[in-house]
Image (cartoon, rainbow, N blue to C red):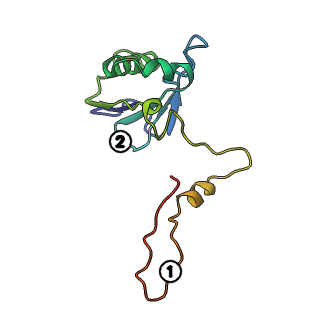
Amino acid sequence: VVLCFERIFWDPTANLFGHVGSTTASRGELFLFWNLYKAPVLLALVAGEAACVMENVSDDVIVGRCIAVLKGIFGNQVVPQPRESVVTRWRADPWARGSYSFVAVGSSGSDYDLLAAPVAPPATPGAPPPQPRVFFA
């Protein structure tokens, strides 16, 4: 869930902050908020059972739940309504199917660079250079 606000109301030096739901089933509901852009934009993550439930809930309800969680963290007077929001539905996306990548044990962040490098067939003398393609992102 991407939330765009008029102003930053959280600590602008924090890369992220978290929220733990009160029940086991709600632990994945809006559990992490990323401050990715140093702008008044937050990216809220949903995982596990909560992600399955939210696939069938309207965008307005999801954004409202985000605001309720943020008000629980920062207080009612501090959190404004977002001026814009985007709710993704990765589980319904046939290419993502609800998954995202992670750095596995024994791996490093440089593995992402290796996977993102363009892949192209070898050059053929006298032919135009092959068009690089990215097969993993």
Residue 23, which numbered label?
Answer: none
User: Label 2 sits on what residue type?
Assistant: Ala
Q: Where 134 sits versus 11, above or below?
A: below
Out of 115 and 28, give the one closest to the viewer: 115
Q: Residue at the right extreme?
A: 106
Residue 123, which numbered label?
Answer: 1
The tag earlier along the polypeptide, 2 or 1, is: 2
Label 2 secondary element: loop
Residue at coordinates 49% horizontally, 23% vertically from top-left? 51
Residue at coordinates 49% horizontally, 26% vertically from top-left? 46
Question: Quick check: 112 left or right of 63?
Answer: right
Q: Where 126 sits versus 61, above or below?
A: below
In 3D space, how far apart are the residues under numbered discs 2 and 1 (Cα atoms)?
43 Å
User: Label 1 sits on what residue type?
Assistant: Ala
Quarter that holds the N terminus: top left
Which of label 2 and label 1 is nearer to you? Answer: 1
Out of 75 and 82, give the one closest to the viewer: 82
Residue 100 placement (x, y as % from top left): 54, 39
Residue 93 placement (x, y as % from top left): 43, 35
Residue at coordinates 35% horizontally, 22% vertically from top-left? 63
Q: Where 89 sits versus 70, above or below?
A: below
Label 1 secondary element: loop
Q: Is residue 60 visible?
A: yes
